Each structure stands twice: as structure tokens, then as C-alpha cells.
Image (cartoon, rainbow, N blue to C red):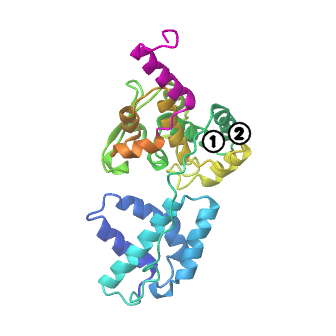
Amino acid sequence: MPTVAQLAERYLDYVRSYKRSADIDARYLRLHLLPKFGKRRINQLEQTEIMDWLNGKVREGYAQATVNRWQVILGHMLRMGKVWGLAGSEVNPLEGVKQKDPNNKVERFLTPAETKRLRQAVEDSPNPMLAPIVALLLLTGCRKRELLDATWDEFRLDQGFWRIPTEKSKTGKSRQVPLSESAIAVLKAIPRLGDCPYVVPNPATLKPFGSVYNSWNSARNAAGLPDVRMHDLRHSMASNMANSGQSLLVIGQVLGHSQPRTTLRYAHLSEGTLQKAANAASAASGWSADAA
């Protein structure tokens, strides 16, 4: 009777044959699911224990959508075990268990004052890579994993862009991220650690961080921002572009959205921006307050 770790090996071989995001499944298994359940025989998994563990991860600060993905991966593995006729797979403890609403539509944007507090907190962090990680997430609007796995050969600082390759992109398509002068300054200030190819590696291993949650959680609490998630830095970048008058098309291009409707969630406009738009339309119409 196989262990969960043995089932995971066969599962990954299977999904790599057709699934673009198989590497993400492998990372979630390696960092989260297998450390908890890997040594168990597949008939030793119990629904209550699995769901209590998943719910606990949300309380620790992981996004519900991320935890839902772990539930999907584990459930899919067990379903395939049954298809393959593996002993112990007759009962899937996750069969019929609904995922919790990820509530991804919750929008949180940093104000300039909050950004200033957060910057000070991450610069005071004992993790020397936290400050450039947070700065680049806010200044580029990239996804956390795209940055943690980024290598120097993807960047063209002299030309002002970062090309994220297909295998590291959530959409399965390569994309080009424009780099502002501030982002380039952050990148140039990051120390190169020998021959390490990664941009923001763990200094102890010279490999990408599996997670920076502990350092991030300490910093956001020190800044008085316990509700701010790392993904909110991406939200804030989009909000800042929208408030500076950029179109939804431009915002979607920068963030790498494949569907325009996705961009609408990030295109939060301040009241001041909306007021300026209304005044501009009024002026263009020729119907001014003076004329009335």
C-alpha cells in the first residue's frame, strides 16, 4: 500500500504530461502537503484531520485560494489512485468536500502613508532580502512566485524590462514587465551573491525562498498593517497605475492578465481621479459653470 509521497511521485509524472502548472503542484506538495502527510499510507488519511489542517493554514495567514489549491491537488491525487487501482484508495476522504469561498474580490490598497510605514518595517527586518522583495512586488506588480524564482538573465536593466519566461508564468505565456527607474534602482542595489543566478535568493542556501511568510508577517505587524497580504502589493501597483490615469488595457498588459475582466478588480480609482475625469468631460462638452 503506497504512502502519500509515493502516490505524489506517480501523480506528478502524470500531470507533467499535460498540465502547464505541474511545477506549481510539485512545489505545493514539497513545501506543504508532503511534510504533513507524506509518510502516511493513503488509507490513513482522514477528512477531519485534513480539513482542520487546511483551516489552520488559513488562520496562519495563507490565502484561502492557495489552501483550496492544496485541497484540490490532494483530492485529485487520491482520485487518480483509485483510477490506477492502488490499494487503500477505495475511499477518498475529500470526495464531495466543498472548497471554502476564497473571497478573492476583497480589495486592499496601500495608501502612501501605509507604504512608508511598511517600507521602514521591511528595511528593519532581519531578513536582508525582504526589503527588495517587497519593493519589487509593489513597483512591478508581479506575482510573488515570479519574483522569488527570478534569475538575473531574465532582466535587461539597460533596456528597462524583465522578461518572465513561459515556465514561470501563471498564464503559461511569457510576458515582458516594464521596469520603472525606482525598480531598476532597487535591482541595482541588490548584492550579487557569488555565482548565484537568483535575484532575491535565501542567503543561507542561495536557492529561491520556499516562503517568506514569517519575515513578512513580522514586518507587516510592526508596520501596524496585519491585514495586508503580499498579494495586496500587486493590487496596490494596479491601483496606483489607475489613479495616475493609465487605461485598463495598459494595466492588464503590465500585470499579465489574459482576460480584461480580471483587470477590473485591480482598477480601483480614487475619488480624486474620478472627479478629474468628470471635470475633463465637462470642459470638453463646452457646458461650463461660467456659461450657465
Secondary structure type for disc 2? loop
Query: Residue 270, how many percent across, how many down?
Result: 55, 32
| Distance from the alpha carbon under mark 2 to that under mark 1 | 9 Å
Based on the picture, tell me whether residue 279 belongs to the magenta stretch. yes
- Can residue 198 be seen? no
Secondary structure type for disc 1? loop
Query: Residue 68, how many percent across, how many down?
Result: 48, 65
Camera-near label (2 vs 1) is: 2
When asked about the image quadrant of residue 263, the answer is top left
Amino acid type shown at disc 1: Pro
Q: Nearer the viewer, residue 289 or 55?
A: 289
Residue at 41% over, 35% down: 251
Query: Residue 5, how many percent across, how many down?
Result: 44, 76
Q: Nearer the viewer, residue 102 or 283?
A: 283
- Vertical arrangement, residue 58 with respect to residue 135, above or below: below
Residue at 50% over, 50% down: 208
The residue pinned by badge 1 equals: 128
Query: Residue 65, how many percent across, how many down?
Result: 49, 60
The residue pinned by badge 2 equals: 124
Mark linked to residue 78:
none
When asked about the image quadrant of residue 57, the answer is bottom right
Relative to 20, 247 lies left or right: right
- Can residue 175 be seen? yes
Q: Residues within 10 Å of mark 1 (few under 14, many from 20)?
A: some
- Vertical arrangement, residue 148 with respect to residue 44, above or below: above
- Vertical arrangement, residue 62 with respect to residue 93, above or below: above
Q: What's the magenta region?
A: 267-292
Quarter of the image containing the N terminus? Answer: bottom left
